[in-house]
Image (cartoon, coloured by chain):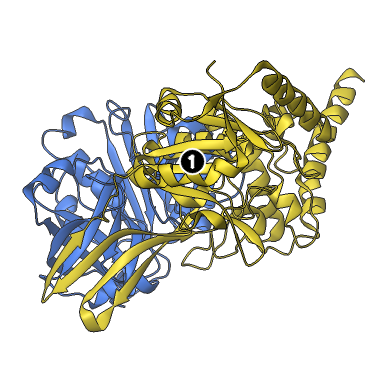
Chain colours: A yellow, B blue
């Protein structure tokens, strides 16, 4: 049988074997929050978790990343590319929604003539060993975005938590290689698979939100001037949490850091957000998105209209972070519902 | 460009002050590596991200024409951090360039057409590139009549004086210069760009109008062009937008689903009318 089992008490053994060969990332509790971090001690791993606050995209697209370093020697300047690590990464414990966000990120950074090699090289060297969500949060809505708490297609290896053990299913060739190398794993039996199936069904039933998002972009295309954006942005304080912690957001700022006294420095990129007024401010003082209405509208339209139009994918995976972490309780699901109602109203008026 | 974020290094060959206020200068760059020069194949209307390494980067339109081989020119107005640092540089200094970026003027589609170029103020640099390109001996035969209308606040702000003198001597370009108010010694047109366009009344027959300048000038000029029966498809603009990466990744220069850095900066009026009014 292709499916294997690992006892929870044997997880340290599994982790130890994998950390020898790979940069091994897993959920770790830091100051009360779950973060995906490089594992130093197996005991730090926390697998009893909903999801991390900061999405694991951070491993491939860090908050701060060096684009190049430079040295100045008199009038001459020497530019050096950042060093590449060829060691492969494993992200252990990634949730299906975040694994799906990697598909979106890979598509975005690889789109068109200009390829973002910084991201793509790391993605190429990264293996996803994810775990299904037995207990989705009440803010989760992946099933509205063709996702599922047990979706395994975006992973290399998929695990299911069966209380005292994990069911392990290799998905891709590289996933099979990894599992084959762990020769001490035992074969799963039929009752294990049945139990996993039941857990999957239960998890799906726990997601209470069902939204029809597939065709939203068609209607949104013509809703730029709809007064709904004013309503949506009224309570927003523009903090940018929704976009900083979004697994699909990719915007960044570029800054030069100068070490003047040592005649060297670097150019870095850092996460940026379209919710900041500085994001689109021209040097002349003109700002095409000068207010909260324009900025809230841009975030929603980018994910649900521009992204599908440009790449044929919806720019959201339904992880619910922006809902759970919004300081003023703005709810993306409510916004989508409102958008869909525009749709219905318009249909009515066409019939009338 | 080998890597989309890593600038190619160039040396400043010459710096020309363009206006009386001395806040607009044209910089001529020569690439340090021959392979970079060879890879830098551009059309008029494209832009580049220019770096003062350690200070930052900004997008600037290319002012030279690809027919002027061996170097590349940019006209930079002192506006923010990076452009101010450019104004402190001297000949010989090293600066970085990433590019060419953006779509540029559709010089292939414009072949066989009469060209009307209308510029206001500082936004003349990529128009200079286009004029120089059309006037090149190998290209001139591919285009019909060339009319250039170029307006400025006062005579001290007129850019590219030596080029204008050179062009004025030719009989295959109609050059109309105007300033906003009368000035001693100014023997050309006086008045805003839009009324001068009306007075010159270029025919819309088989023509393309290229309009660059401050928003109010563009608005008034477009209404005059519409009176002259120019269709939206016949009017071209070049947009400015805040940019960081210039290659469609950093996110901020979008208008609707279009990125000004990738899909622009050149858009026809017909294309602009389809986009949300957010620029």
Vertical side of B44 occupied by A44: above or below: below
Q: Is residue B116 visible?
A: yes
- In the image, A302 versus A8, the foreground residue is A8
Q: Residues within 10 Å of mark 1 (few under 14, many from 20)?
A: some
- In the image, A172 versus A146, the foreground residue is A172
Residue B155 falls in which quadrant of the image? bottom left
Location of the N terminus of chain A (image quadrant)? top right
Give coordinates of residue B136: x percent, y percent.
14, 40
Vertical side of A35 occupied by A186: above or below: above
Q: Secondary structure at mark 1?
A: helix
Q: Residue at x 50, y 52 (%)?
A: A58
In-image side of A213 versus B95 (left or right): right
Give coordinates of residue B69: x percent, y percent.
10, 46
Q: Which residue is mark 1?
A: A14
- In the image, B218 versus B6, the foreground residue is B6
Location of the C terminus of chain A (image quadrant)? top right
Q: Residue at x 46, y 50 (%)?
A: A59
Give coordinates of residue A76: x percent, y percent.
11, 69
Q: Chain of mark 1?
A: A
In-image side of A324 versus B238 (left or right): right
- In the image, B85 versus A93, the foreground residue is A93
Name the outermost residue toward the right. Answer: A352
Give coordinates of residue B150: x percent, y percent.
34, 55
Q: Is residue B172 visible?
A: no
**How many marks do you count on the picture?**
1
In-image side of A303 versus B49 (left or right): right
Q: Residue at x 19, y 40 (%)?
A: B41
């Amino acid at each position: 049988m292709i499916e294997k089992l690992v006892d929870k008490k044997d997880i340290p053994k599994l982790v130890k074997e994998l950390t020898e060969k790979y940069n091994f990332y897993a959920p770790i509790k830091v100051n009360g929050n779950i973060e995906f971090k490089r594992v130093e001690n197996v005991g730090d791993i926390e697998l009893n978790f909903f999801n991390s606050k900061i999405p694991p995209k951070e491993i491939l697209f860090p908050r701060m990343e060096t684009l190049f370093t430079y040295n100045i020697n008199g009038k001459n300047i020497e530019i050096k590319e950042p060093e590449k690590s060829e060691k492969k990464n494993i992200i252990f414990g990634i949730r299906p929604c975040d694994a799906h966000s990697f598909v979106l990120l890979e598509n975005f950074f690889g789109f068109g003539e200009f390829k973002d090699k910084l991201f793509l090289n790391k993605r190429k060297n990264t293996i996803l060993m994810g775990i299904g969500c037995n207990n989705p949060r009440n803010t989760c809505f992946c099933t509205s975005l063709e996702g599922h708490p047990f979706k395994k297609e975006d992973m290399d290896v998929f695990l299911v938590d069966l209380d005292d053990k994990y069911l392990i299913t290799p998905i891709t060739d590289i996933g099979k290689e990894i599992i084959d190398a762990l020769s001490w794993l035992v074969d799963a039996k039929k009752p294990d698979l049945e139990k996993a199936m039941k857990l999957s069904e239960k998890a799906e039933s726990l997601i209470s939100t069902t939204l029809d998002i597939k065709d939203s972009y068609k209607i949104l295309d013509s809703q730029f001037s709809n007064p709904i954006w004013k309503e949506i942005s009224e309570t927003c304080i523009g903090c940018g949490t929704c976009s900083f912690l979004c697994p699909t957001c990719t915007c960044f700022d570029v800054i030069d850091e100068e070490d003047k006294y040592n005649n060297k420095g670097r150019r870095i990129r850092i996460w940026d957000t379209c919710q900041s007024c500085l994001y689109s401010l021209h040097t002349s003082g003109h700002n095409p998105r000068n207010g909260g209405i324009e900025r809230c509208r841009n975030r929603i339209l980018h994910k649900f209209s521009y992204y599908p139009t440009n790449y044929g994918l919806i720019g959201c995976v339904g992880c619910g972070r922006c809902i759970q972490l919004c300081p003023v309780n703005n709810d993306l699901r409510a916004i989508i519902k409102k958008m869909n109602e525009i749709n219905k109203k318009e249909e009515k008026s066409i019939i009338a | 460009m080998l890597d989309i974020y890593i600038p190619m290094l160039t040396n400043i060959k010459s710096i020309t002050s363009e206006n009386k206020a001395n806040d607009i200068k044209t910089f001529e760059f020569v690439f340090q590596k021959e392979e970079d020069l060879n890879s830098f194949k551009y059309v008029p209307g494209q832009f580049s991200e220019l770096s003062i390494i350690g200070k930052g980067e900004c997008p600037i339109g290319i002012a030279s024409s690809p027919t002027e081989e061996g170097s590349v020119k940019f006209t930079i107005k002192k506006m923010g951090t990076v452009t101010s640092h450019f104004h402190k540089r001297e000949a010989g200094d090293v600066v970085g360039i990433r590019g060419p970026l953006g779509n540029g003027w559709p010089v292939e589609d414009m072949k066989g057409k009469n060209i009307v170029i209308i510029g206001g103020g500082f936004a003349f640099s990529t128009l200079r590139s286009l004029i120089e390109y059309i006037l090149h001996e190998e290209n001139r035969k591919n285009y019909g009549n060339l009319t250039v209308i170029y307006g400025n606040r006062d005579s001290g702000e007129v850019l590219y004086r030596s080029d204008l003198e050179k062009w004025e001597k030719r009989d295959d370009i109609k050059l109309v210069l105007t300033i906003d108010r009368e000035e001693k010694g100014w023997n050309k047109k006086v008045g805003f760009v839009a009324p001068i366009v009306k007075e010159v009344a270029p025919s819309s027959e088989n023509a393309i109008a290229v309009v660059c300048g401050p928003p109010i000038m563009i608005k008034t000029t477009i209404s005059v062009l519409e009176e002259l029966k120019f269709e939206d498809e016949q009017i071209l603009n070049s947009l400015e937008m805040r940019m960081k990466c210039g290659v469609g990744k950093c996110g901020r220069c979008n208008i609707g689903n279009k990125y000004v850095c990738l899909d622009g900066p050149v858009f026809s009026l017909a294309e602009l009318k389809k986009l949300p009014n957010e620029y």
